[in-house]
Image (spheres, helix red, strand yellow):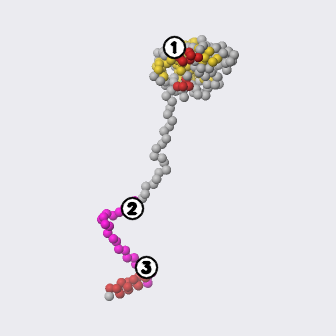
């Protein structure tokens, strides 16, 4: 009898255009309803970023330090006949690096390469204006000379402390008393020890060992 009743119901539903769906739910073995989860999206951004290049331990003494050494680098042997700068007054091995400047009417600042104490500010034959300060390079005491500066622009006096990047002065006007008649450039030298030494040239190559090639330190 029950089978006939079920059959009649199915016929009635189908005749009316409907669909009878019978779903039997099976109990979960765990008794816990499982909630579907959406898979986590994979990020295209790397989990680690590439670190920026480390900054140099020392500041540049002048902005174009790397590109301006076009005439007299450290250690070059100079004579009046062979010098790349004419006319030339000097003979010997160059104790510093000359950084050339082409903008004669522009003030060009010079900077402390690291911290130290000013030892000398004044005029020196062959340079015009000079500032020297004492510091430590690779745990070694040195004095650093800035030649051909405009003394009236010096921001430090003898005994003053300087910090890395401090503006010390601007370069002197070319072919004037500020540069002792020289072209506009910075003579930059690093002498070992605490003694203040003004020599721009030495007469034997072995004497160069008393100085440090600036290019070996500042890169």
Q: Tell me the mark number nearer the camera, choosing from 1 and 3.
A: 1
Q: Which residues are magenta?
A: 15-37
Q: Quadrant of residue 188?
A: top right
- Which residue appears farthest toward the left when viewing the image? 31
Dot 2 surroundings within 10 Å: few (below 14), some, or many (20 or more)?
few
Q: Earlier in the sequence, mark 3 or mark 2?
A: 3
Name which residue lies at 41% across and 82% down.
Answer: 13
User: What residue sits 48% from the left and 42% below the top?
Assistant: 49
In the picture of the structure, the residue carrying the numbered disc 1 is 196
Q: Secondary structure at mark 1?
A: loop
Q: Residue 75: which quarter of the image? A: top right
| Residue highlighted by disc 3 | 18
Q: CA distance from mark 3 to mark 2?
A: 31 Å
**Which residue does the image show at 56% across and 15% down from the upper left?**
207
**Is residue 133 shown above or below 18?**
above
Q: Is residue 9 above or below residue 183?
A: below
If you read the primary sequence from the N terminus, does the residue marked by circle 2 or circle 1 appear first? 2
Q: SS for tag 2?
A: loop
Magenta stretch encompasses residue 23: yes
Q: Nearer the viewer, residue 38 or 211?
A: 211
Q: Quadrant of the N terminus?
A: bottom left
Q: Position of residue 55 (x, y in %)?
A: 50, 32
């Amino acid at each position: 009898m029950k089978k006939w009743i079920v059959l009649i119901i199915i016929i009635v539903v189908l005749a009316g255009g409907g669909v009878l769906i019978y779903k039997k739910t099976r109990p979960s073995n765990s008794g816990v309803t499982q909630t579907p989860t959406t898979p986590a999206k994979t990020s295209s951004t790397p989990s680690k970023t590439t670190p920026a290049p480390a900054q140099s331990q020392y500041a540049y003494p002048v902005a174009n330090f790397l590109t301006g050494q076009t005439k007299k680098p450290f250690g070059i042997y100079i004579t009046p006949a062979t010098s790349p700068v004419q006319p030339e007054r000097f003979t010997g091995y160059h104790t510093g690096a000359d950084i050339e400047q082409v903008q004669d009417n522009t003030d060009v600042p010079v900077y402390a390469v690291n911290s130290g104490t000013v030892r000398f500010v004044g005029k020196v034959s062959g340079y015009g204006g000079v500032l020297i300060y004492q510091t430590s390079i690779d745990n070694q005491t040195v004095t650093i000379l800035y030649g051909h500066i405009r003394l009236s622009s010096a921001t430090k006096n003898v005994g003053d402390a300087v910090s890395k990047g401090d503006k010390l002065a601007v370069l002197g006007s070319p072919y004037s008393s500020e540069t002792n008649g020289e072209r506009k450039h910075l003579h930059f030298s690093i002498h070992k020890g605490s003694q203040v030494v003004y020599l721009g040239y030495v007469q034997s190559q072995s004497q160069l060992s008393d100085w440090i090639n600036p290019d070996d330190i500042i890169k």
